[in-house]
Image (cartoon, rainbow, N blue to C red):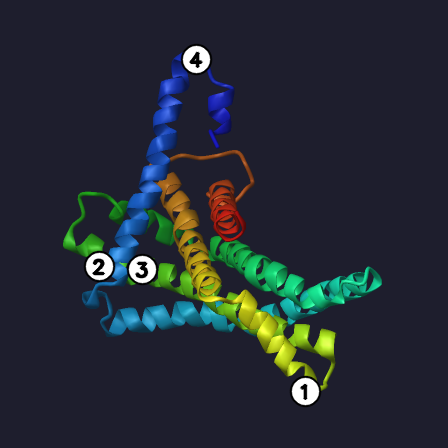
Amino acid sequence: MLPKSFLYSKPRDWGRHAFRFVFSWWYMVYLGAIALVMAFSPSTYNRDNRLTTSRYIYTSTWQVLPWFTVLAALVSLVLIRVVVVTSQSYGLSRYALEMVVRVLVLELIPLTAAMFVALRAGLAFNAGDALALAAAATPDRSRQAQNRLRRDLVPQVIANAFAVLSLAMVSSVIVLVLAYMSVYGLSPWGMGDYTRTVGRIFNPAVTIGFVLKTVFFGLSVAVIPTAAILESHRYGRTSSSTVQPGAVRLLFVLLLIEAGSLAVKYI
């Protein structure tokens, strides 16, 4: 994950690039810590901040929830049908439901929701706000700077994290319903086998892991792109790349969380 400039730089410049690389990750962790502390601080939630947070939540979640859920349901329905038909052709139909739940609900839907929210949040981030927030997100902060962070940064972090959780949870419930209908149809007589299979998959350990993974996805999406944009504005770091700032780092963190989740569950 070293920057491209490190790979093409002279050996005498490796130390400088390594320092920038480490500092960039530290700045991301530092900004995330500030946002989390302020998010859990009661003083953050005055009337103005509550209104701002609710407006960001409405924009990032409610406006996209219906059509994202419909799109996820359509794609999931196709994948469910492929899995069911393939398993029936090989005489493995009893494993179809379990495979659908483990692959779609536990793995693909949370990851898709996180990447969707990250892309949308990065495109909607205002450059003018980035300049002001970058000046505020420094170790030497005045009272005015702290209020600026509480008013503009924390609501966006909360809204993006909430969007990932909402999109993932609602889509997962819809996919569970579609999975039942694809395997058992509209008959209510398959409810017993269905609940036993889903209950066996969602044991306490898997359920806690699913919730924690979704929460970590939400925090990563909320913090990493914002930190990358603020860092580039504050320190004047421009890039000729057309890739959204922090996109590669966010993808790396999401895949790292996903790999860790798979390792804990199946190894």
Near mark 3 (Cα within 10 A), the count class, few <14, some 14-19 or many ≥20, is many
- Which mark's residue is nearer the viewer, 3 or 1? 1
- Who comes first in sequence, dot 3 or dot 2? 2
Q: CA distance from mark 1 to mark 2?
A: 55 Å
Determine the secondary structure under disc 4. helix
The residue under the point 18% across, 55% down is 144
Q: Amino acid at mark 1?
A: Pro
Task: Evaluate if marks 3 and 2 touch, with contact meaning CB atoms under 8 Å apart.
Answer: no
- Who comes first in sequence, dot 3 or dot 1? 3
Q: CA distance from mark 1 to mark 4?
A: 69 Å
Task: Evaluate if marks 3 and 1 touch, with contact meaning CB atoms under 8 Å apart.
Answer: no
The residue under the point 17% across, 43% down is 140
Image x and y of residue 31, in percent: 30, 48
Give the residue at mark 3.
154
- Which mark's residue is nearer the viewer, 3 or 2? 3
Determine the secondary structure under disc 3. helix
42 versus 216 height, above or below:
below
Image x and y of residue 101, in percent: 61, 65
26 versus 57 height, above or below:
above
Q: Amino acid at mark 4?
A: Pro
Give the residue at mark 1.
188
- The answer to whether 215 appears left or right of 35 in the picture is right
Q: CA distance from mark 3 to mark 2?
A: 10 Å
For this rendering, which residue is in front, 260 or 189?
A: 189
Q: CA distance from mark 3 to mark 1?
A: 46 Å
- Which mark's residue is nearer the viewer, 2 or 4? 4
Determine the secondary structure under disc 2. helix
